[in-house]
Image (tube, rainbow, N blue to C red):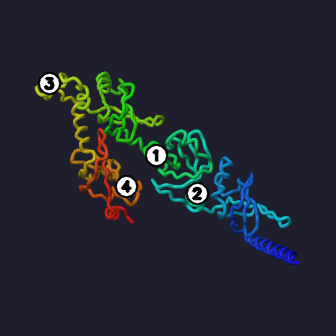
Amino acid sequence: MKGDTNISQQEGCLAKRIENFERLLAKGDNIAFAIKDIKDRGFIVNTNGLNGFISFGHMPWKYINPKSWEAIFPTLQGKIFFGKVHHFKKDPLAIILNGETAQFKRYDLIENEKCKGVVVHRVDYGVFIDIGYNFKWRCGSIVALLHKSNFATEEAFEQIKTGDILQPTFWGYNVDSQIILGTNQALKGWFNGNIEQLIGEVLPVKIVEIGNNTPCYLAAGKYEATLPPTYSIYGTRRAKINNAILKLEVGDLIHCEVIMVNYKTKTLQLKWVLEQEIEKILSRYNPDADNKAKEIEKNFPNLHNTIENIIDKKIAEKINLIGKTVKAEVIKIEDDLGRTITKYLVEGKFIGKLYVSNDNYKISVKEKKQIERNLQNGEEILGIVQSIGKNFIKLHWKLSDEELFRFVEQ
């Protein structure tokens, strides 16, 4: 009798749940469901106390590979989503749902912050990670590539499998508005396109290793580089440059212009630009040549006053400013269309390019333009010289919170 009573009560509860479900169905509103279990083609779900089913093809987002659902299933269990009823039958009970309806919040990724994601797919060149997991799936699926070059070794990359949870850093977006993820900070510029901005800049280059009589170069302390002594770069001076390169030693520091970036090898192509450095290296192990050069320069001070050497001295002067705090005057001019353009004159003689930052806030491109508009003609700002080019100096202006409040409308 007791067993019959329990069965009767269970049947009564089931009937009541079905009745409540029918009322919700009649309203036409979205129905909440929780992921309960996984099958070959979809998920078993719980909706209003009743078991139902939703296929992978009718989930709120899609994956190209159905195996990706298996990878994220452990993180989906118990998560609640919303959808419409695709099919309903009372006897026998059958509920099939369709989750293809708007239900997610807008996500906000902050550059240089870490985010957790589930590996949903592997390819030869990297792994695809769904960082929707970082937002507990409240923003839906957010899939991005983590390139294999971010892993320390080939073996480390091969050990990664679908379902693994990784924590890469969000590096921003590429030119196609695709999310860029990474773990190796040195590679960031290669993936977000900022490396192109180095072209034309003159960087300090250190000789870090020599093997097979070939120097290895590290530009600005972090970029691998090449210094080819080709005719197309140096013209008739090619042989002279080649001789100087052969005399370079580990620990030498020279200054070179970035003339090209190689995305395939992730290296910068350089041109050695300081004639004084070249002559100094050439005189190495040859004191007679060094003394002769000094004697000529003493007796004929204008002999080397060529256009090339005049340019060289200007570059050397700018190189001496790298890392120093300098003054930059704001100059407002109008172009042919009547638009106001903001320029910067560094130390009264060099054209400046301005990079603006704040320790507590990421300044957008739009806000940088607003800051430049609010600068007054003739106003002076203090900045640190980051790098130089033949025709400019890159200046870093770090705004305090008070200065940021002044220049950016709140």
**Would you name the residue on which mark 2 appears?**
133
> In the image, what residue type sits under mark 3?
Ile
Q: Position of residue 380 (x, y in %)?
A: 24, 55
From the image, state whether disc 1 or disc 4 is nearer to you: 1
Quadrant of the rendering where the C terminus is positioned: bottom left
Q: Secondary structure at mark 4?
A: helix
Residue 296 location in percent, x, y? 14, 24
Which residue, given by chain and number where applicable, does mark 4 sit on? Answer: 369
Q: Does 189 sit above or below residue 72?
A: above
Looking at the picture, tell me which residue is in the foreground, 224 or 347.
224
Neighbourhood count class around disc 2 (C-alpha, 10 Å): few under 14, some 14–19, many 20 upward: many
Q: Are marks 4 and 2 in contact (CB under 8 Å)?
A: no
Which of discs 4 and 3 lies nearer the camera? The answer is 3
Label total for image:
4
State the CA–CA distance, disc 3 to disc 2: 71 Å
Q: Amino acid at mark 2?
A: Tyr
User: Disc 1 marks which amino acid?
Assistant: Asn
Mark 3 or 2, nearer chain start: 2
Q: Residues within 10 Å of mark 4 (few under 14, many from 20)?
A: few
Residue at coordinates 81% horizontally, 73% vertically from top-left? 10
Q: Circle 1 is placed at which residue position? A: 184
On the image, the x and y values in percent for residue 366 come to: 41, 56
Q: CA distance from mark 1 to mark 2?
A: 22 Å
- Which of the marked residues, 4 or 2, is nearer the chain's N terminus? 2
Pick the quarter of the image with the N terminus. Answer: bottom right
**Residue on which disc 3 sits:** 296
Residue 146 left/right relative to 246: right
The reply to whether dot 3 and dot 2 touch (C-beta < 8 Å) is: no
